[in-house]
Amino acid sequence: MKDDLIKEGKFRYTEKGEGTPIVILHGLMGGLSNFHGVTNFFPDKGYKILVPELPIYDMPMLQTNVKNFAKYVEEFIQFKGLKDVILLGNSLGGHIGLLHTKMYPKLMKALIITGSSGLYESAMGDGYPKRGDYEFIKKKAQDVFYDPAVATKEIVDEVFATVNDRVKLVKTLAIAKSAIRHNMAQDLPSMTTPTCIIWGENDAVTPPDVAELFHELLPDSDLHWIKECGHAPMMEHPQQFNAILDAWLQKRKF
């Protein structure tokens, strides 16, 4: 999907299909390619799929936080002239989607979160004490998935490069701390946007009880589980993820 990146103003994104807009928000260590299953499936169902590259490492240090990423998403939505938006976010992307929905509820048609931070997440470690150790990073990357084989060499190499880049590492840790500070437990009960929660039963980063708590606190939510699945269901079980989401969108008439 890198080849398909559209560059307009300060935004870089991919766009596919026509219809109701679904804006996809990637996670801290996740790229646009993590959502290939979604971007290849839903345009034929009558949706416009947009995946902006979030400025994870591009903002000034003091502005590198969840709230400013949510504002960036809003700027992108306004720039594209989108209305009745459905947001889909994984991990940090889910957290950004939740905060955006809280800040701009009138623009939101629906929200889908999977392996989302915002209540609790198990980080890779505050200091990455073994960041020069490739095998250590490989194991950490594999732990994100139920099936360690999903953590391809390309994925491991990208994580390894990120944690060994001092600037990116410092910003990664700043974002992780910002995510912890922006705990949304108090906000969720007043957020009435219809929300689809899709979770891996074996998620070790945001464990299953986090999904249960999201479901309990969000007034209008549906919770769906995927077996033998870790932190990124749309990568590990793309067909099942798409089937669950497609059925939910049809049931809700979105």
Image: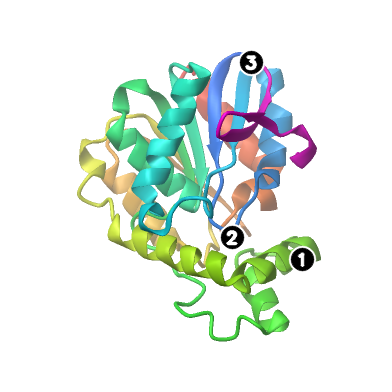
Instruction: Name the residue located 29 percent from the left edge and 34 percent from the top edge.
Output: 103
Residue beneath the point at 43% across and 29% down: 75
Q: Which residue is mark 2?
A: 230
- Label ID, residue 245: none
211 relative to 2 in the view: left or right: left
Asked if the magenta segment contains residue 231, the reply would be: no
Task: Please provide the residue range marked out in magenta.
Answer: 1-17
Up/down of 250 relative to 128, above or below? above
Q: How many marks?
A: 3
Residue type at tag 3: Gly
The residue wearing badge 3 is 46
205 or 133, which lies in front?
133
Q: Residue at x 64, y 69 (%)?
A: 141
Q: Quadrant of residue 9?
A: top right
Q: Secondary structure at mark 1?
A: helix
Task: Please provide percent x and percent y for residue 214.
Answer: 34, 49
Which residue is label 1 attached to?
149
Judge from the rendering whether residue 38 lies leftward or rightward of residue 56; answer left or right: right
First in residue order: circle 2 vs circle 3: 3
